Image (cartoon, rainbow, N blue to C red):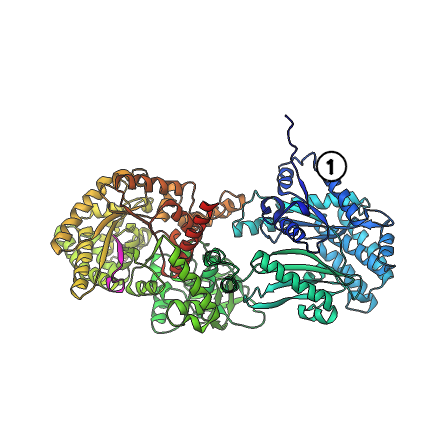
Amino acid sequence: MTTQVEKFVYDFAEGNKDLKDLLGGKGANLAEMTNLGLPVPPGFIITTEACRAYLKGAEPPTLRDEVSEHLARLEQAMGKRLGDPENPLLVSVRSGAKFSMPGMMETVLNVGLTDASVGGLARQSGGNDRFAWDSYRRLIQMFGKTVCGVPGEAFDEALEGAKKAKGTHNDLDLDTDDLKALVNTYKKIFTEHTGREFPQDPREQLDLAVRAVFDSWNAERAILYRRQERIPADLGTAVNVVAMVFGNLGPDSGTGVAFTRDPGTGNRGIYGDYLANAQGEDVVAGIRNTIPLQELERLDKKSYDQLLEIMAKLENHYKDLCDIEFTIERGKLWMLQTRVGKRTAAAAFTIASHLVDEGGIDLDEALHRVTGAQLAQLMFPTFAADGELKPIAKGIAASPGAAVGKVVFDSHRAAELGNAGERVILVRRETNPDDLPGMIAAQGILTSRGGKTSHAAVVARGMGKTCVCGADAIDVNIQARQFTVNGHTVAEGDIISIDGTSGNVYLGEVPVQPSPVVQYFEGKLRPEDDELVAAVHRIMSHADARRRLRVRTNADTGADAARARRFGAEGIGLCRTEHMFLGDRRELVERLILAQTEDERNAALDALLPLQRNDFIEIFREMDGLPVTVRLIDPPLHEFLPPLEELAVKVALAEARGEDPGKDATLLAAVRRMHEQNPMLGLRGVRLGLVIPGLFKMQVRAIAEAAAAVKRDGGDPRPEIMVPLVGAVQELETVRQEAEQVLREVGVEALIGTMIEVPRAALTSGQIAEAAEFFSFGTNDLTQMGWGFSRDDVEGSFFTRYLELGIFGVSPFESIDTEGVGRLVRISVEEGRATRPDLKIGVCGEHGGDPDSVHFFHSAGLDYVSCSPFRVPVARLEAGRAAVTAVGSDSR
């Protein structure tokens, strides 16, 4: 039996648009256009498999012969030969990965041109010497820069020098002699930077260009883009070798870019640019002003009409916005590329809705074509300034949006001014849970430390607040109430503007415009009043109809609950009761912790009970008829007590002055007694409830009495009690017994369940389900404990390096680690439902609003996800997309 030799090179006629994994996006689409009978210059594609082999250090031994074979076919088709002095074939060499990816090698045109063949090219063009030498100088410039790493500025300076000597600003004014001289100058530049002569072997030019495309897959810019867009690092790129057609042969030639719809708004129409007597890079480089595509009708109506026909054919074929590159060579139209065009978030929704109206796609496909990330972009306000803004600093774009306000440096001041109606930006080195009131009151948050998963970033995203983190050029001086950056001193009360989409920080007020999509979710804008809103409404309605996952919210106040309900939340999946103990109530928690006798402890609990009850009444009223999962208190104790070092200093100073430290000494003793090396793994959650008698019982009573009060008023409260940090079923059984007694006394029914956030709980879920009526995954802690690192600490230390090394494709706190933490989730679901088939299971960690994580939770069989109010629409959309994608996968 003969072994089939692996194939690494394909002619255009051998491929199609579905072979993007093998041929890359560009090559697959060139093949598709060829098969459609469109005027595509002939060529061939070197596959991504060849690239992967090359990058592993073993270029396929058959590759050179395959390229030679396909090159011979190309020469025959064109009636020209690569490097022929009389009738030269020239080719372009372009990268083409599966996904369009900025950072890859730029196109090299005119490959194959040499000293020996430049005269032949002139004769081939009808004696156009200027064209031939212009093509040659372009080759040396592009080849030198993209293949051999010659600084592009060196060539640019030489070109500017030639134009200056000619007394012109337009490269078209350079004549043949000028261009010949420029070629000689370029050759010298090439030799100076590479240590060799410009290659005169056409095949060597081609082979070096192909290898440069392969190498560009691992260029720094490409790696950065892949990481940002979550593109796998092992795909590799294809290489497209295409016979040259020339747009720089004179005024009857040119090059352009066309879009079948406006990629900015999604509106139907003719959009694009054209540049006469030019090659493709001229349009991108901006060396001359382009003209609107519609002007081509006046210059060359035949080509214009043909282009419109092709644009309509391609859009109808791809059933989507198409981005097209074309060249006109002496009145003949050639198609150089097409792809499904990138578009803004607004255009994505608008185009999808329009295509449904036109019968091109159905609503399932429309839902598939938009993303939660795009919807999130549409929900943030934006700066509405014209012209270029100059930032004073740049940080990490942690939570999108635009925010303007007075600078304040502490939470209390931010809350004070914010509650008085002032717009403020809270500026901190970093934030902590104590800053929550100020963060809520602020328009935006700016920190000089931290990253995308820092406390400031996570909380800001959850609240829909604009946030810029890690602006390390900013020197924050809390005592002086000012920060300095790049020679600027910004004092408290000064106005700044921060852009959470770009990470930019600006001095002064930049105009802001509200998001119409948020106005729609808030009920302030009707779908029929705005085309974009109509498209969002249509697709969101279909997502709601298709999704299986329910979507709840994480909310701790009536205001948050009300907003989340307007945004489509179907209940509360996490009400954090520890957030109810901050501010003025903190002293009551101190009294509880410091209580020496049962009477003192009961007095503190009695003071907390009515406060808690009123909190729950407000929330139950806002979520009337919908489930509300209340998590019993789960704070590390250190969050409610002063820092050990601070207390020790206060006590020591008081004693040094001969004063009685009083309460501070008592507090210091308690803090020392309860001090933990790692409080996140210490006395918190269920452990705290078991160690401090009456604490959980008080909370359950507050929940039950609040539900009873709302029910008496005609409401329909549906409380669910969640016990945190359970690792053993015995812990849950103890709390459950006490909770059920309270519920019976008050006469209220409530489900009792637990938060699965300890790995042991996930692995013993079969036992825990015997005492739990529901599970809710706390994926933040499950990730911390599963990986063995603290979210608050690691991002500033080694996360950046891990991302650079590819150990993380994305932070496991942003998107769930499906292989590790996700496996714990799957085990827990399977074992929990084996014990209790009707077990209700959700997730309430921040992953509940992450698009990729929502798809995982759908596949894992969860009943609902819960996320912050602002992310509820995103979760609704992605839950619908997950259902549609799953059906599509099943059918395939």
The magenta span reads 620-631
* x then y, percent, for residue 44: 70, 46
Left-right relation of 394 to 582: right
Q: Of residues 118 and 434, which is closer to you in this image?
A: 118
Asked whether, in this view, residue 73 is left or right of residue 713, the answer is: right
Residue at 36%, 46% (x, y): give it. 861
In the picture provided, is 200 more to the left or to the right than 628?
A: right
Q: Which residue does the numbered mark 1 point to in the structure image?
A: 65
Q: Position of residue 365 (x, y in %)?
A: 48, 56
Residue 535, given in percent of the width and then of the height, sits at: 46, 65
Q: Which quadrant holds residue 273?
A: bottom right
- Is 605 located above or below residue 683 in the figure? below
Q: Position of residue 140 (x, y in %)?
A: 78, 52
Q: Can residue 788 be seen in this view?
A: no
Tell me which corner region of the image, top left, top right, bottom left or bottom right, holds residue 169. bottom right
Residue 332 in view in this figure: yes
**Residue in the foreground of this view, choosing between 736 and 747:** 747
Q: In this view, does 667 lie above or below 354?
A: above
- Residue in the image at 29% along x and 45% along y: 725
> Does residue 76 belong to the magenta stretch?
no
